[in-house]
């Protein structure tokens, strides 16, 4: 089953297959070049308005800045206050959620999404995307917004896949423009290697509960 415009068809079944077989999926051209450019300019406008803040880890009373763990800047987005390119991304993600709920019975009911800006030298050390006090986060979903990313630019996403025998396999994923990566938030540890260029993404979590804080 395919959704999206004819210019950029998105095979949501590819996501389901990847998640079922390996716990993660990579979909190229989730956004086309124009859509990426639109999101980039909306994000850079927000950055000029000083709307990005240093990210932390944990939430509520557990929240910490933790600059030794992660050094990205974030800006949370929503449907109401975002520009048209960001809203288009949110709608496309909603289409993916509809498909996942229908085919995998995931029961996704909410999402939290932010722009993430990694300036040169920034990183996010190996971690799991769930909070210590439990989390409704089921799937982590990241869409990269970087033109002309080249080997040597750094900033790759590493995903660690546990094997049954206690060993693990590592996958290295380049943050290429328009590429969507989706993985199980509760199971797969991952990290962002230090980037040598500024690195932009729309990063979010699909949740099976409404936000309660
Ligand atoms: C995160 C994260 C990965 C990436 O924000 O939690 O792991 O590739 N991001 O940006
Ligand atoms: Mn993460």
Image (cartoon, rainbow, N blue to C red):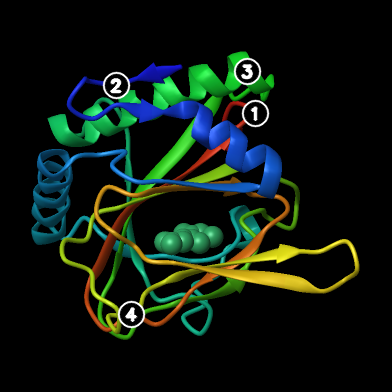
Q: Are marks 4 and 2 in contact (CB under 8 Å)?
A: no
Q: Which mark is residue 15?
A: none
Q: Position of residue 94 (x, y in %)?
A: 41, 23
Q: Is residue 173 left or right of residue 212?
A: left
Label 2, label 3: how far apart the Cα atoms are: 17 Å
Q: Which mark is residue 103?
A: 3
The residue sitting at 21% across, 55% down in the picture is: 51
Mark 3 and ligand 2: say if the CB distance to the nearest ligand atom is below 8 Å.
no
Classify mark 3: helix, strand or loop.
Answer: helix
Residue position marked by numbered label 1 in the rendering: 208
Front in this rendered view, residue 54 or 126 = 126
Residue position marked by numbered label 4 in the rendering: 195
Classify mark 4: helix, strand or loop.
Answer: loop
Residue position marked by numbered label 2 in the rendering: 4
Q: Does label 2 or label 1 sit earlier along the sequence?
A: 2
Q: Does label 4 or label 1 sit earlier along the sequence?
A: 4
Of badges 4 and 1, the one in the foreground is: 4
Is residue 200 visible in this depiction of the protein? yes
Of badges 2 and 1, the one in the foreground is: 2
* Looking at the image, residue 53 lies above or below residue 45: below
Label 1, label 3: how far apart the Cα atoms are: 15 Å
The residue sitting at 51% across, 19% down in the picture is: 99
Q: Does label 4 or label 2 sit earlier along the sequence?
A: 2
Q: Are marks 2 and 3 in contact (CB under 8 Å)?
A: no
Is residue 137 visible in this depiction of the protein? no
Q: Does label 4 or label 3 sit earlier along the sequence?
A: 3
* Looking at the image, residue 13 lies above or below residue 162: above
């Amino acid at each position: 089953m395919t959704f999206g415009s004819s210019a950029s068809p998105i095979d949501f079944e590819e996501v389901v297959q990847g998640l079922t077989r390996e716990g993660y999926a990579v979909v190229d051209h989730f956004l086309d070049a124009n859509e990426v450019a639109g999101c980039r300019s909306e994000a850079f406008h927000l950055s000029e308005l000083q709307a990005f803040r240093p990210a932390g880890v944990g939430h509520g009373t557990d929240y910490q800045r933790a600059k030794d763990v992660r050094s990205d800047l974030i800006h949370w987005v929503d449907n109401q206050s975002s520009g048209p390119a960001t809203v288009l991304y949110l709608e496309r993600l909603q289409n993916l959620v509809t498909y996942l709920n229908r085919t995998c019975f995931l029961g996704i009911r909410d999402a939290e999404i932010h722009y993430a800006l990694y300036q040169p030298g920034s990183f996010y050390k190996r971690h799991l995307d769930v909070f210590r006090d439990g989390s409704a986060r089921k799937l982590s979903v990241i869409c990269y917004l970087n033109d002309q990313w080249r080997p040597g630019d750094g900033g790759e996403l590493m995903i660690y896949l546990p094997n049954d025998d206690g060993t693990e396999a590592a996958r290295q994923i380049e943050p290429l423009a328009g590429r969507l990566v989706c993985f199980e938030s509760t199971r797969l540890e991952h990290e962002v290697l230090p980037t040598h260029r500024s690195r932009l993404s729309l990063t979010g979590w699909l949740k099976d509960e409404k936000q309660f804080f």
